[in-house]
Image (cartoon, helix red, strand yellow):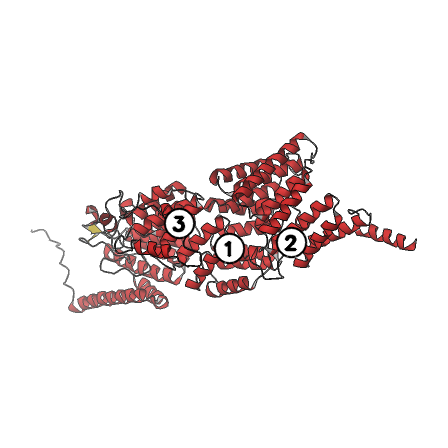
Amino acid sequence: RRPATHARRPDPPPSVSALSRDSAGDMASTQQMRAMERLLAAEMWESAEALGGFLCSASPRLPPDAVASAERARHLALFGDALLGKGEHRRALNAFRQALSVNRLAPKVPTGNNLSSAMGTPETPATPGISPSTPGGMTTPRSSENAAAIVAPQPPPASSSSSSRPVDEASLKFKIGRCHLALREYRAALAELETIPARARTLPVTMTLAKTYRRTGYERAAVACYKEVVRDCPFAVDAIAALAELGCSGEEIRALLPADGNDDDATGTSRDAMSVDGAATDGHREARREEPQGGSDPHGWLHHLAEAHGAARSHASDVAANHFRRLDDIFPDNPRVWCQLARVHRDAGEVREAADCYRRCARADPCVVEGMDVFASILYEHFPDAGTSVAASDDADGGALGSFGVLSHGFGFGTNGPSVELNVLVNNLLENSPARAESWSAAALYWESRGDAEKALTYAERSSDIDDQHVTAHVTKGYLSLKCKRADAAVHAFKRALQLAPTTRSYAGLVAAYLILGRVKDATATAKACARAAPNASASHALLGDVEAYCARHGGGGHGGAAQGGTSAAQGHRDRARRCYEQSLKLDPSCAGVVAALADAHASSGRSEAAAELLRRHLDTHAAHDAGAQVALHCRLGGVLAQSKQLADALGHYQSALAIYPESDEARRGVSRVERLMKGQDPDAPDEEVDDEEEEEDEE
């Protein structure tokens, strides 16, 4: 008997109708994906989100095979792009993570010289404004070549020219990092961005890595990434500015740039012929005709920009101003150049020149936002309207702010009331750019000028919440915290400002906060750090004088120590404070706060005539255009004269202060005190006892 055979029958061939259905489904899916790409390119986020949701629903959540995995990965990537454009970062993060996990299940596909696009499919073009260039485009070179090699696209790696995933993993990881950054999850963003291979890091990836490193405190890694960006694209001016802020010198930054065809030193060419308001003399016009323009030397101006930022960071104000004026010769009336020049003038104590630069910047671009909160602080401190100035050095503030030379020049002394120009500036900023930190920082200064420090502090906190990297927001928040007697909060704000960009104003605020808290060692270390960072700055020497003056009043300790006025140690502190203030005035004779502090040092050492002469001289020469400083200095001079028993002259100066600002509490208290001294009464007695004595005299 023959054994029975159980051979398996072959499967019947698929019917024509089944094949047609599958091909029709593939065609429909392809058409929908192309429509999705078109919507993304047109930035129609609502429609793209809806269509992306339909595509994701049509593909199975658990793909049965590799082909289905590739299709679902592309759908999820497109859906995530729509959510990212719409601003729903948490949902976009979830979609990109799903796309990344599903994409790893899909097989690699041959691509030739064209890698997977940023949208996720080899045949899909990248969406403008959403995704970075693909790793097959411009990569980050590791060494500085000639100019053409730096800016030319690099060839793709040989290993990636044969096959790739259906969705580019580097692009997905970059978008995941962007979502974390938008959600302020900086550590998670850094962890994701660091997983992108070095050969796949494009220019946007490297720049984002640099910013994230800087935000999380890894400054050395941030410097390395910024240098890679400048090597890759020398025209990335924000990377050049960031390198200068992180401490790189102008020469170090210039070494990253292409060779300059004209290496004339800007410091050797005099720009004094050019006035701040834009007027140019014949010599200036001749220099402009000789200046190389962008067509003959396209990289020459980058060297001036690098030197300008480096000099500004090292507090070489004259050098920085010369380089920025050279840039203004090449690019006339550029708001960015004038804004940077204004900062240089402001750091050098040239307040009027800084204000003129900011006004010219606003005329060139009425909607400009960058630096306008610094302009608002200048208007608040130095340019009040007639009859509205306020001197805020009252003893009601604890005397702490008005006692320190540098601080008294800022928010504690000579601060002025609201002006029409400040009001217009703040209204324009809030109307044109309500989402920018500069707008709310300027608004905080406006409300402080109105006398509402608590509301001003709320606005400053909102400014720092909008942009934690904005230095002026933290500086404003710190000073307003001092005004509201929140020294601990001020310490935190000023430390954050110093981490971002060390400036003398931030050092001054931190020293004041430490002294208010009685932390003398910390204040001394901060003042010395400021002196090392800016040895030629007037504020550095004044800060050291502030610390010495505090030690003289409190016996070298905190608030618990009693003042040892007659001891040799206290006198030694006063002498050192006097020398520091005198050195500060040599560098900047116009600072009213340092003058007041030096006058206090003279008066406490028994040199009342020297103190009075110093105050009179400053009132006649430098304080004519600062009404707030006039009020405070008249009050200070009245106190010195009253101490030396010149009561009539003291009363006259207090009355002069009231004539400038009738609401000055310090001037009112001074008048009352001098009048009591003239009547032979105790000037420190409470008002009730004085009234009783006057009633008894009337009865007699």
Q: Which residue is mark 1?
A: 352
Q: Is residue 431 left or right of residue 677?
A: left
In primary-sequence order, the first of circles 2 and 1 is 1
Look at the numbered discs 3 and 2 and tell me whether their residues touch, using CB distance below 8 Å: no
Q: Identify the mark at residue 631; answer none if there is no mark.
A: 2
Q: Residues within 10 Å of mark 2 (few under 14, many from 20)?
A: many
Element type where label 3 sits in the image: helix
Look at the numbered discs 2 and 1 and tell me whether their residues touch, using CB distance below 8 Å: no
Q: Nearer the viewer, residue 4 or 390?
A: 390
Q: Which residue is mark 3?
A: 322
In primary-sequence order, the first of circles 3 and 2 is 3
Q: CA distance from mark 3 to mark 2?
A: 36 Å
Q: Residue furthest top?
A: 568
Q: Is residue 353 visible?
A: yes
Q: Position of residue 343 (x, y in %)?
A: 46, 52
Q: Residue furthest left?
A: 1
For the point 72% across and 50% down, the residue is: 649
Three-letter amino acid code at the position of disc 3: Asn
Three-letter amino acid code at the position of disc 2: Val
Q: Position of residue 486 (x, y in %)?
A: 61, 48
The number of numbered badges drawn on the structure is 3
Residue 22 vertical placement versus 482 (above, below): below
